[in-house]
Amino acid sequence: MAAAGLVRRGAWVLTAVLLILATASSETQRAPPRAPSGVTGFHRGVNILGYDRYWDDPSRGSFRVSDFVEIRRAGFDFVRVNLFVFRHLDPSGKIDEKWLKRLDWVVGTAGRNGLGVILDEHDSGECAKDSLLCMVKLSRVWQQLALRYAREPRSVAFELLNEPGGKIDAAAWNRMVAELLRTIRASNPVRPVVVDSLGVRKMRPGDMAPLPADDRNIVLTFHYYSPYRFTHQGAKFGKVRDVHGVTWGDSADRQTLHEDFDRLARLAAAVQRPMLLGEFGVYDKSGTPVELRAAWVGAVACEAERHNFSWSYWQFQGDFALWDEAADAWVQPIKDALLPPRGANSVDRRC
Ligand code: GLC
């Protein structure tokens, strides 16, 4: 009897050990590739102020000091400030001092509230039309911004240009990156600089800008709005304004997301640069149910974290909004998807 009992117990122990080993090995198989850490120390952020009237008249702006406080308190650690600088250049390329003072306020107030800042040059629309003029203007912009913010701590980062594309092909962009980096490095030798490589954005590593090997303060970035027919359905400005009712979340959808992020993480690891997912979100004004939007947003944020990417949600106010201006409150399902409430460990959440 006793011997039979021992055998039975032995069998149980063996089964348990085999189970543990099997789980461990499938976990290892599923462990995703990870981008290198470092450079900024940013993790979770949100895009702010892109289309705010603040820039023309602070008294008519929507963004308030209390928003910085709320953003920090919620658990974000940086903001990506979307800047349309070109329209504030005079004919000689000098940036309007009044506008710069407004930017000083943003940088200072974010910092005082414990938030890192990415100064994102968002003139991609104009740049897409004329790469030469774009380069002239970008050089002037970065000469001035680099000098002005040279003494800021490294928690202020520069992003050369949002979503380079259109008339800027890979060769032109590579030249622009090299030249803009030279300009910035003259006054900011170790400033974190965010570079959207055309190849990274389109996920074609072949086109990627060759970055200076000895410059270890560069962060790669890409934006993720895939599948576009889901994230932009009904958006007035997009190519799918008449599309409605697209859902997301079956296993094929999730598999595509895994594979896209695996590919990007492998790329980041290969070139040994940290990766920032600078924008992702779902258009919110065309009736896509908030639960569905939150499911995509949560899965993408989770996927970014599994791959050791920092991320910034598009965007705080306006469309794709995280903050409901009418209610003066967070859009709770989106906020919870980005920053799972305590108890739901975000690192362990499953994408
Ligand atoms: C880009 C555009 C912005 C748009 C967003 C989502 O950042 O500059 O205007 O809302 O993508 O499509």
Image: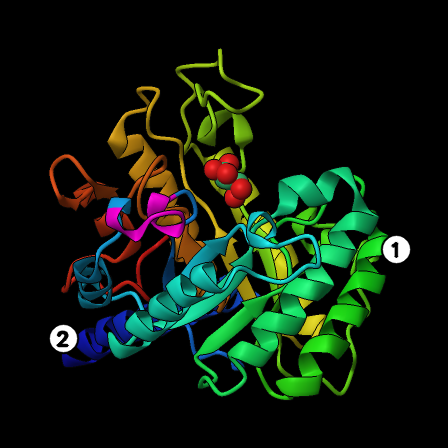
Q: Disc 2 marks which amino acid?
A: Met
Amino acid bearing label 1: Ala
Instruction: Kindly check if marks 2 and 1 are in contact, taking CB atoms under 8 A apart as contact.
Output: no
- Label 2 beta carbon within 8 A of ligand 1: no
The tally of labels here is 2
Q: Main secondary structure of the magenta part?
A: helix
Q: Nearer the viewer, residue 295 or 27?
A: 295
Give residue 278's mark: none
- Please name whichever residue, 329 or 201, is drawn nearer the observer in this view of the structure: 329
Circle 2 crowding by C-alpha within 10 Å: few under 14, some 14–19, many from 20? few
Residue found at x 73% / y 76%? 183
Tell me the number on the disc at residue 1. 2
Q: CA distance from mark 2 to mark 1?
A: 79 Å
**Residue 16 painted magenta:** no
Q: Which of these two is toward me, 268 or 186?
A: 186
User: Up-down: is 51 above or below 38?
Assistant: above
Q: Residues within 10 Å of mark 1 (few under 14, many from 20)?
A: few
Q: Position of residue 202 (x, y in %)?
A: 70, 46
User: In the image, residue 233 lies at what x, y percent?
Assistant: 46, 22
Query: Mark 1 sits on what residue?
Result: 171
Report if residue 22 is visible in the image. Answer: no
Question: Going by the image, does 255 lie left or right of 291?
Answer: right
Stretch in magenta: 52-59
Q: Is residue 21 left or right of residue 225?
A: left
Q: Is residue 103 visible?
A: yes
* Residue 207 sits in quarter: bottom right
Question: Residue 195 or 205: which is nearer the viewer?
Answer: 195
Q: Residue at x 33, y 24 (%)?
A: 285
